[in-house]
Image: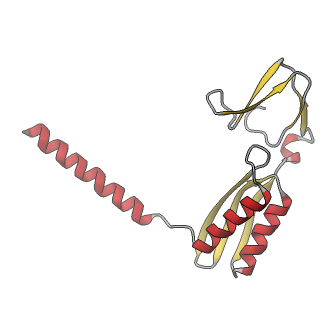
Amino acid sequence: MKKYLSFFLLSFAVSACMAQTEKNEKKLPVEVDELTQHVRKQFIPDKRVAIFDVDYRFPSRKEIIVKGATTSLDAKLALLGGLKQSHYQITDSMMLLPDSAALEGKTYGIVNLSVCNLRVEPDFSSEMTSQALLGMPVKVLQRDGWY
């Protein structure tokens, strides 16, 4: 009987904590979400070719901090322009890739393996997007610990 009572109390406490965290989460305004999806579809139709990773913070109601990274200057300008038209005060913290300063100008490389697996994240267990063959040129976008 003690097992069931302790299990019930534990599950009740966990569900109460989960309900509280869901209540505290702020949802993205519909107009911002629609603008983000429109820009993504227009400028970045294939995520294997270009990057458009955007995150938002809202310090106040009409103030927005735009964070993330993209490889398309046009997508960044379209997003910021659309947010200005919606009368948001924008703080732009979005990075344009390739990050030449962090890479010290070394934004291109050559594959030196017979077959090189290209992955979504810089981790061996990450999903493989494509493969490159010996001698193929590759564009290095960002340094994340190692290439």
x and y percentages locating residue 116 in the rendered image:
79, 24
Left or right side of 83 for 103: right
- Above-or-below relation of 92 to 107: below
Q: Residue at the location (23% across, 52% down)?
A: 12
Left or right side of 40 for 135: right
- Above-or-below relation of 137 to 53: above
x and y percentages locating residue 31 in the rendered image:
62, 74
Total marks in image: 0
Q: In this view of the protein, which residue sits in the foreground, 103 or 55?
A: 55
Q: Residue at the location (85% across, 24% down)?
A: 133
> Which quadrant holds the N terminus?
top left
Q: How is the image coloured?
A: secondary structure
Left or right side of 33 for 49: right
> Which quadrant holds the C terminus?
top right
- Quadrant in which residue 29 is drawn: bottom right
- Quadrant in which residue 17 is drawn: bottom left
x and y percentages locating residue 105 in the rendered image:
93, 42
Left or right side of 136 for 86: left
Q: In this view of the protein, which residue sits in the foreground, 85 or 59?
A: 85
x and y percentages locating residue 111 in the rendered image:
87, 25
Furthest-top residue in this view:
114
Q: Residue at the location (73% across, 34% down)?
A: 145
Q: Residue at the location (84% across, 17% down)?
A: 114
Q: In this view of the protein, which residue sits in the foreground, 79 or 68?
A: 79
